[in-house]
Image (cartoon, rainbow, N blue to C red):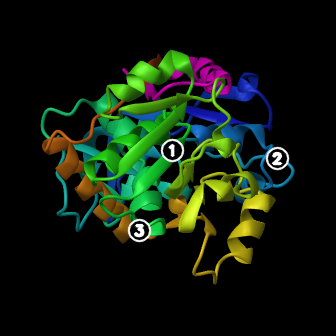
Amino acid sequence: MRAVVFRAYGGPEVVEVVERPTPVAEPGTVVVRVEASSVGASDAAFRSGESFAARLFAGLRKPRPSIQGSDFAGIVDSIGDGVTEVAPGDSVWGATGAAMGSHADFVRVKASGVIARRPAGLSSTDAAALVDATAMAFLRDTAQLQSGDRVLINGASGAVGTLAVQLAHTWGAEVTAVCSAERAQAVRDLGVERVLDYRAVDIPRLDDRFDVVFDVNGNLGYRRARALLTPTGRYLITVPTFGALWWHLWTIGSRGRRSRIALTGLRKDAAKRHDLAVTAELVDAGSLRAVVEGTYPLAEASAAHAHLDRGRAGQLVLSMA
């Protein structure tokens, strides 16, 4: 089967499509014929090696020669002994977590892991774009978002941002979105009335105060963002830098303003399965939809990574068709 790997850290040019053995179902496992798999910021971080946190996971000097990707949508190809959760032919979606391996024609996952039948009518491309629950985990669990909270989302037009905007709006928050002017209308189409152009507005100098500042892009920083917070406001950042970790530890016991970072990808499978079920409910209710900027065939995985490095609105997806 075809699979995406990289043998050195660097730019999109290090991404390769190689032949690897097709996995075989073992007891308690499921082999999925992958139809689509998202390509996101974590994939770019592992490829570039610029983040020390990414190197701790992927390899300090050079990346481990593993197949990339974690989120997938596809069709169950075969099941191992003892598997009752799904059957061959089922349309499924899920995530491999630290095991990676979804940027390939086939992936093997534990039946007890993060895999479920996907909502009827949801395409594999849209399903792959919706699997990642980073936005949900940050807003619901880390921020403990409440109806009526005022939320600023910095980086509202990206893969995590477009989901965060929809979730915050659905849960009754008052949302202020920050993105480029070119992408403002796309964000408004998600239900947000107030969208600010980061080039035209000095965000840290806003007179507004927010219960939650979700710094999806990670370029605002707690030092600048805390002036935007209410006396008990929460600042959230998805980028695991040393600075983010420092402010998290410094404010961890605070009853006032505080900074929070959460390694959502390392949560237990049970929590991720619950997120997938909640996502399915929101999709069925029409409260959440995928925002896909581009789809690339697996053979053009390097081009997808180049697109990542240029910036994007919404999600990028690899298609195995």
Q: Quadrant of residue 234?
A: bottom right
In the rendered structure, which segment of residues is drawn in magenta? 298-321
Real-space Cα separation, disc 3 to disc 2, in angstroms: 38 Å
- Residue to which mark 3 is pinned: 144
Residue depicted at x 25% and y 57%: 278
Q: Amino acid at mark 2?
A: Lys
Query: In terms of sequence position, does the residue under pointer 1 or pointer 2 come before the other?
Result: 2
Query: In terms of sequence position, does the residue under pointer 3 or pointer 2 come before the other?
Result: 2
Determine whether 185 is above or below 33 in the image: above
**Is disc 1 surrounded by few (<14), some (14 to 19) or many (20+) residues within 10 Å?**
many
Q: Nearer the viewer, residue 305 or 107?
A: 305
Side of 11 relative to 23 (left or right): right
Residue 316 drawn in magenta = yes
**From where the camera sits, is residue 262 visible?**
no
**Is disc 2 surrounded by few (<14), some (14 to 19) or many (20+) residues within 10 Å?**
some
Label 3 or label 2, whichever lies nearer to me, is 3
Real-space Cα separation, disc 1 to disc 3, in angstroms: 15 Å
Residue 21 drawn in magenta = no
Residue depicted at x 66% and y 59%: 226
Q: Nearer the viewer, residue 297 or 155?
A: 155
**From where the camera sits, is residue 114 visible?**
yes
The kind of secondary structure element at disc 1 is strand
The quarter of the picture where the C terminus appears is top left
Provide residue 241's location: percent of width, then percent of height. 75, 56
Q: Amino acid at mark 3?
A: Gln
Label 1 or label 2, whichever lies nearer to me, is 1
Provide residue 11's location: percent of width, then percent of height. 77, 27
- Residue to which mark 2 is pinned: 62
The kind of secondary structure element at disc 2 is loop
Side of 118 relative to 185 (left or right): left
The kind of secondary structure element at disc 3 is loop
